């Protein structure tokens, strides 16, 4: 697929009505941008490309704005480095998660309860399955931002000694302003650290007692290139790179899908 095909396929203006896209104001803006005199021949190709993108954004700016550079509210307090919950908090959120997912708390034991800013991730597991819950402790007026839960079957008993086992990265949404990615699973006996590279951030997972978990809020791209390229994480957050550090001090980086039991 050529670059032109990619741009056309991802053009957010493909559903814009003709009367809007060809309104006098839009056409005047396009004419003004493209009419700029070109006086330096060696820069001709670069200048045309720059003005072409500017024209697209200028004409359909009202459409592009909501999907570019609009990070959700979780960034206000979210931290790439997690903190453990207190014993009292862990008990409270484990009970809450069991209620949300309708699992018996006696069978499903809390594996990790981690805090990032005002958000809490709870990870329960039993011999029969797993449960993950994510919530904000600072609810918005319209809804409790981030009340998300997930259920899955039991993971394989033993992941690779230097690797992970997971059911994958889940994309969740707790409301119109909130989208997050969360992941949990088992860590091999040699694994001491797990760091995800997600949308330009280094997200350190909690690793304890042979389990790991992490989550991050969705970051919107701040330009058109970020919208169409998977490597930014906008389209690739469900399969980010993960760097695994081992007890001997070495590390290796893979895509998390390598450890997804569903693949």
Image: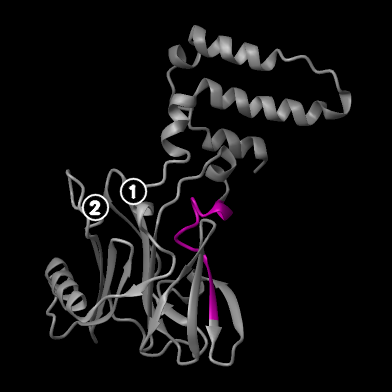
Reply yes or no: does residue 237 show up in magenta.
yes
- The quadrant in which residue 5 appears is top right
Q: Residue at x 52, y 14 (%)?
A: 26
Whether residue 167 can be seen here: no
* C-alpha separation, residue under disc 2 versus residue under disc 1: 9 Å
Q: Secondary structure at mark 2?
A: loop
Q: Residue at x 47, y 76 (%)?
A: 259
- Looking at the image, tell me whether mark 2 or mark 1 is earlier in sequence order: 1
| Residue 39 in view of the camera | yes
In the picture, the disc for residue 73 is 1
All told, the count of numbered labels is: 2
Q: Position of residue 258 (x, y in %)?
A: 51, 74
Q: Position of residue 81 (x, y in %)?
A: 43, 69
Q: Where 199 sits versus 70, above or below?
A: below
Q: Of 159 and 26, which appears nearest the observer?
A: 26
Q: Are marks 2 and 1 in contact (CB under 8 Å)?
A: yes
Up-down relation of residue 73 to residue 165 (above or below): above
* Dot 1 alpha-carbon crowd within 10 angstroms: few under 14, some 14 to 19, many 20 or more: some
Residue 24 in the magenta stretch? The answer is no
Left or right: 155, with 133 as reference point: right
Instruction: Give whichever of 119, 25 is nearer the camera.
Output: 119
Numbered range of the magenta stretch: 230-244
């Amino acid at each position: 697929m050529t670059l032109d095909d990619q741009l056309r396929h991802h053009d957010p203006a493909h559903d814009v009505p003709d009367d809007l896209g060809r309104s006098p104001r839009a056409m005047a803006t396009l004419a003004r941008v493209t009419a700029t005199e070109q006086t330096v021949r060696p820069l001709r190709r670069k200048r045309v490309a720059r003005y072409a993108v500017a024209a697209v954004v200028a004409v359909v700016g009202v459409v592009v704005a909501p999907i570019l550079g609009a990070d959700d509210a979780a960034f206000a307090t979210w931290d790439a480095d997690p903190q453990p919950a207190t014993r009292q908090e862990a008990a409270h959120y484990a009970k809450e998660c069991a209620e949300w997912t309708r699992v018996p708390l006696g069978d499903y034991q809390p594996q990790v309860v981690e805090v990032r800013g005002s958000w809490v991730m709870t990870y329960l597991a039993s011999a029969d399955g797993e449960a993950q819950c994510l919530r904000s402790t600072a609810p918005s007026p319209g809804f409790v931002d981030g009340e998300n839960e997930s259920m899955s079957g039991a993971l394989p008993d033993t992941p690779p000694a230097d690797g992970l086992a997971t059911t994958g990265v889940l994309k969740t949404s707790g409301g119109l302003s909130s989208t997050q990615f969360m992941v949990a699973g088992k860590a091999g006996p040699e694994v001491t650290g797990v760091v995800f590279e997600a949308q330009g951030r280094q997200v350190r997972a909690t690793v304890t007692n042979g389990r790991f978990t992490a989550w991050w809020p969705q970051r919107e791209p701040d330009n058109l290139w970020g919208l169409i390229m998977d490597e930014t994480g906008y389209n690739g957050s469900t399969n980010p790179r993960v760097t695994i550090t081992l007890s001997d001090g070495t590390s290796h980086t893979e895509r998390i899908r390598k450890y997804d039991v569903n693949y």
